Image (cartoon, helix red, strand yellow):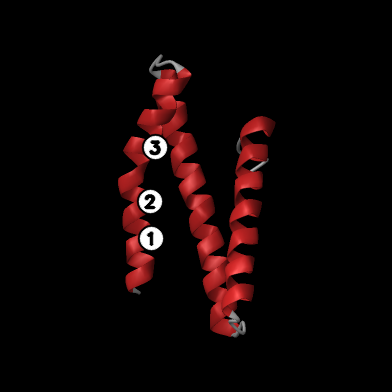
């Protein structure tokens, strides 16, 4: 992510991914789940899906900013336009 995006956006994305991982690790610890090979694969898949969601939102944000919208409206529209793709990807992975 540091390679594709500028430092500020990458730092925000990395911080959110670390927060996601910490919450996920806490839930695994609280529930008492023993990580098997499939459990490790599920953790890696969920982190990959979080990265994918970040990339989708950033790309939509870039499109909205190029269209000349102010930053607050661009962020709102980026989330609104990227939500169906994120939702469908998560739903598909959950069903599989």
Labels 1 & 3 near each other (Cβ < 8 A): no
User: In this view, which residue lies farthest toward the front?
Assistant: 30
Q: Judging from the image, what secondary structure is the residue with disc 1 in?
A: helix
Labels 2 & 1 near each other (Cβ < 8 A): yes
User: Residue at image x 37%, y 69%?
Assistant: 94
In the displayed structure, does residue 24 sit left or right of residue 89? right
In the displayed structure, does residue 20 sit left or right of residue 92? right
Residue 6: tell me if it is visible: no
Residue 79 marker: 3
Around disc 1, counting alpha carbons within 10 Å, would you say few (fewer than 14), some (14 to 19), or many (20 or more)?
some
Q: CA distance from mark 3 to mark 2?
A: 10 Å
Residue 7 location in percent, x, y? 69, 33
Residue 34 location in percent, x, y? 62, 85
User: Residue at image x 39%, y 37%?
Assistant: 79
Residue 90 marker: 1
Q: Earlier in the sequence, mark 3 or mark 2?
A: 3
According to the picture, the residue beneath numbered tag 2 turns out to be 86
Residue 12: tell me if it is visible: yes
The quadrant of the picture occupied by the C terminus is bottom left
């Amino acid at each position: 992510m540091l390679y594709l995006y500028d430092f500020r956006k990458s730092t925000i994305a990395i911080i959110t991914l670390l927060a996601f991982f910490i919450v996920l690790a806490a839930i695994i610890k609280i529930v008492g789940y023993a990580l098997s090979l499939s459990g490790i694969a599920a953790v890696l898949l969920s982190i990959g899906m979080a990265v994918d969601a970040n990339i989708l939102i950033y790309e939509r944000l870039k499109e909205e900013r190029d269209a000349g919208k102010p930053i607050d409206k661009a962020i709102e529209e980026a989330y609104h336009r990227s939500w169906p793709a994120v939702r469908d990807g998560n739903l598909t992975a959950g069903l599989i």
